[in-house]
Amino acid sequence: MTTADRRPRVLSGIQPTSDSFHLGNYLGALRQWVALQETADAFYCVVDLHAITVEHEPKALRERSRVSAAQLLALGLDPDRSTLFVQSQVPEHPMLEWILGCETGFGEASRMTQFKDKSAKQERTTVGLFTYPVLQAADILLYQTDRVPVGEDQRQHLELTRDLAIRFNGAYGRTFNVPEPFIVSETATIKDLTEPEKKMSKSSSGPRGCLYLLDTPNQMRKKIRSAVTDSGSEVRYDPESKAGVSNLLTIYSALTGTPVEKIESEYHGKGYGDFKGDLADLVADSLEPIAKTTKEYLADTAELDRILAKGAEKARSVASRTVAKAYKKVGFYPPVSM
Ligand code: TRP
């Protein structure tokens, strides 16, 4: 076994449900994806199968998958070191999902809080939305994953994944590695710019609340300058009573690596205006290169699609082995190679 083989296997996924990732995705998760390439054998998946669990537009979906992948590359995911792929190009995902679905209790799936939240918001809830967590378990178990870097909101889905792995292994003999969650720390949770009590998300508030990586530098500056700050004028970290300023301090700190206390003392005696002005420039300058590189990738979609096809092949070489094992265990005919 080479050293490379002993690196922990990491897998994570992100839905291609918007035209651009936002600052919260970047600082909360994607930056860590990039960093993990140094120490892990990382698999990153644009989960377009999950994206059709709610209403979608076919043309927009394919485009968003492409833009998502381009942004991940622009952020620094290196397709030679990590495996970057689009879920729909790896048919093993729904193959394993079926088997795992037949191991999942109806009551067990009914307890998923994300399903309850999401279905409450839909006019029409589908079986696909119900089995979303089972597909997510397949995503993870296919790659014999050791660690899954995700946010706190995914903890319950990871518990289900572990339960399914343990249950299947118990019933049929060791087939899946049992993954550990790797919950991204609280400090990196970026809040909405206009409603700082909520997590930043494309759906949370108005267009000013969410800062997209593909915004123009001017849009970014405006959003930061018009971010809600609190009464008072002191640049001080206090998420309870100064949620707005605290969120901006978190962003500043995350982008520069400067501890919050140091930023506080730098702005001691200065007002919100100075701080926001500097942060506006910092955000625009830090994110502009990402947007530029994203556009370069999108200017040559043939090359981008080649990179993704290669990623899917690499993913399939691992996933197909797991599916072959699981098929054998449950008594199916072996899959024929495609
Ligand atoms: N459900 C995850 C989210 O909304 C996305 C996801 C799908 C995922 N498959 C995954 C995350 C596998 C980690 C691993 O954020």
Image (tube, helix red, strand yellow):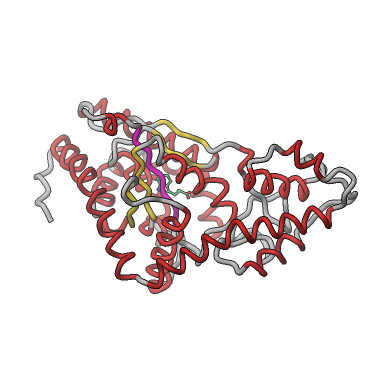
Q: Is residue 58 shown in magenta?
A: no
Asked where in the image residue 104 lies, by quadrant, the reply is: top left
Magenta stretch: dominant secondary structure: strand
Residue 17 is left or right of residue 143, and the answer is: right
| Position above or below: 25 against 173 | below
Percent across and percent down for residue 111 are: 48, 40
Percent across and percent down for residue 3 are: 28, 29
Q: Which residues are magenta?
A: 8-15
The residue drawn where x is 32% and y is 32% is: 165
Task: Work out whether residue 107 can be spotted.
Answer: no
Residue 46 is left or right of residue 5, and the answer is: right
Asked where in the image residue 209 lies, by quadrant, the reply is: bottom right
The N terminus - image quarter: top left
Task: Work out whether residue 37 can be spotted.
Answer: yes
Q: Is residue 12 shown in magenta?
A: yes
- Comparing 124 with 70, the one in front is 70
The C terminus - image quarter: bottom left
The residue drawn where x is 19% and y is 38% is: 326
Percent across and percent down for residue 306 are: 27, 63
| Position above or below: 58 against 321 | below
The residue drawn where x is 38% and y is 48% is: 44
- Comparing 328 with 124, the one in front is 328
- Comparing 57 with 31, the one in front is 31
Tally of numbered tags: 0
Residue 255 is left or right of residue 323, and the answer is: right
Percent across and percent down for residue 153 are: 54, 43
